[in-house]
Image: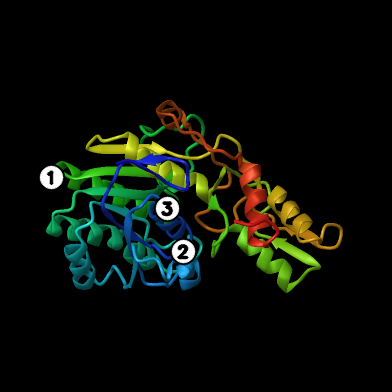
């Protein structure tokens, strides 16, 4: 019998699902939505970026199970997949520190690509065939204009984007060779409570450390779409339910964008520091090596399927700030 998740979507029963990175920012929200829909959820997370605080409210939930493990350790992870035999794997585990991996490309090789390859291999060994993959707009690199899911060639400018693109390629080859069904979801910056990094998190932390000045990396004119985490989770479940081809690929996001300078002003205002905190900017157009300062892509495919984000980019940013500061309940 179909059940209704907290996102408002009616979901077909999927049995036990596995969420890699399930204690992370996005993963923990996804676990909440799946549990609200009546599913048993197994989360695998090494807690290097995720946090027990994100899932503390699930301690007494009998349908939720956390396995603290590094997915790069294949034998242990493969044993978990073989034991639980999930009907669907939501693969979210990855390195999310794009700037940090500039100093050590091996971080994305292991945390972003190797985790994907190990997930696919463990699924193949256990006879599991459905994978929903959290990809990224970073696979498009610095492409501009009307970018849809068929855009080519793809030249990422970050190691993170490169590892995600390599992961997409192996997911496609596993689908072709071993009968997998895959859902590849490319999304931009995601904001909301439980975030552990990103522009809003960084600005709040800096202003707490020094309420008199907010230093912004880059010139502040970076202009990108920001998607609220609840909207993204709703899209993941919607696409999983609505499509069933061997390989399903969708851009997910919002058509509006927000400048970094606007985010800085919103954070200062919500923290009661407008007029006190001096906002200073760097000179370059990029915040860091691998940053894409201007981005937007086409969402026709997902809109035609029947999904659209509830919040604009500015609304997502403002709500995220307020919830992170505890000014609005989650």
Front tag of 3 and 2: 3
- Cα–Cα gap, marks 3 and 1: 34 Å
- Crowdedness near tag 1: few (<14), some (14–19) or many (≥20) residues, C-alpha within 10 Å: few
Q: Are marks 3 and 2 in contact (CB under 8 Å)?
A: no
186 above or below 126?
above
Q: Nearer the viewer, mark 3 or mark 1?
A: 3
Label 2: few (<14), some (14–19) or many (≥20) C-alpha neighbours in 10 Å: some
| Cα distance between the residues tagged 3 and 2 | 38 Å
Residue at which label 3 appears: 36
Q: x, y (%) of residue 114?
A: 28, 62
Residue 296 is marked as none
Q: Position of residue 110 (x, y in %)?
A: 32, 66
The residue labelled by disc 2 is: 102
In the rendered image, which quarter is residue 71 located in?
bottom left
Q: Position of residue 182 (x, y in %)?
A: 26, 44
Q: Is residue 293 above or below residue 159?
A: above
Question: Residue at horizontal 47%, vertical 32%?
Answer: 299
Q: Which residue is rendered at x = 65% and y = 43% of the image?
A: 315
Q: Is residue 91 left or right of residue 129?
A: right
Position above or below: 44 against 321: below
Q: Secondary structure at mark 1?
A: helix
Q: In this view, which residue lies farthest toward the front?
A: 1
Please tell me in which quadrant of the rendered image residue 117 appears.
bottom left
Q: Quadrant of the C terminus?
A: bottom right
Disc 1 designates what residue? 177
């Amino acid at each position: 019998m179909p059940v209704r998740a907290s996102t408002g979507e009616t979901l077909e029963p999927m049995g036990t699902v596995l969420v890699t990175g399930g204690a992370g920012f996005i993963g923990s929200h996804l676990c909440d939505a799946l549990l609200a829909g009546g599913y048993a959820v197994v989360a695998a997370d090494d807690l290097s970026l995720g946090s027990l605080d994100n899932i503390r409210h699930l301690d007494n939930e009998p349908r939720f199970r956390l396995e603290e493990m590094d997915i790069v350790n294949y034998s242990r992870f493969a044993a978990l997949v073989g034991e639980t035999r999930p009907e669907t794997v939501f693969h979210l585990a990855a390195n999310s520190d794009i700037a940090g991996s500039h100093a050590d490309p091996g971080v994305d090789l292991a945390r972003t690509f190797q985790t994907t390859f190990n997930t696919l291999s463990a699924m193949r060994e256990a006879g599991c065939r459905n994978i929903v993959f959290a990809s990224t707009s970073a696979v498009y690199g610095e492409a501009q204009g009307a970018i849809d899911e068929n855009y080519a060639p793809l030249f990422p400018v970050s190691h993170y984007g490169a590892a995600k693109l390599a992961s997409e390629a192996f997911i496609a080859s596993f689908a072709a060779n071993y009968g997998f069904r895959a859902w590849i979801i490319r999304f931009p910056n995601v904001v909301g409570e439980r975030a552990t990094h990103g522009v809003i998190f960084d600005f709040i932390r800096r202003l707490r450390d020094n309420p008199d000045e907010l230093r912004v990396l880059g010139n502040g004119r970076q202009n990108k779409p920001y998607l609220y985490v609840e909207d993204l989770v709703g899209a993941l479940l919607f696409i999983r339910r609505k499509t069933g081809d061997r390989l399903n690929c969708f851009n997910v996001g919002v058509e509006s964008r927000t400048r970094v300078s606007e985010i800085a002003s919103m954070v200062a205002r919500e923290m009661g520091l407008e007029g006190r905190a001096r906002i200073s900017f760097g000179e370059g157009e990029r915040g860091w090596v691998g940053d894409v300062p201007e981005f937007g892509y086409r969402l026709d495919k997902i809109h035609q399927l029947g999904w659209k984000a509830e919040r604009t980019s500015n609304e997502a940013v403002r709500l995220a700030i307020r919830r992170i500061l505890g000014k609005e309940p989650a």
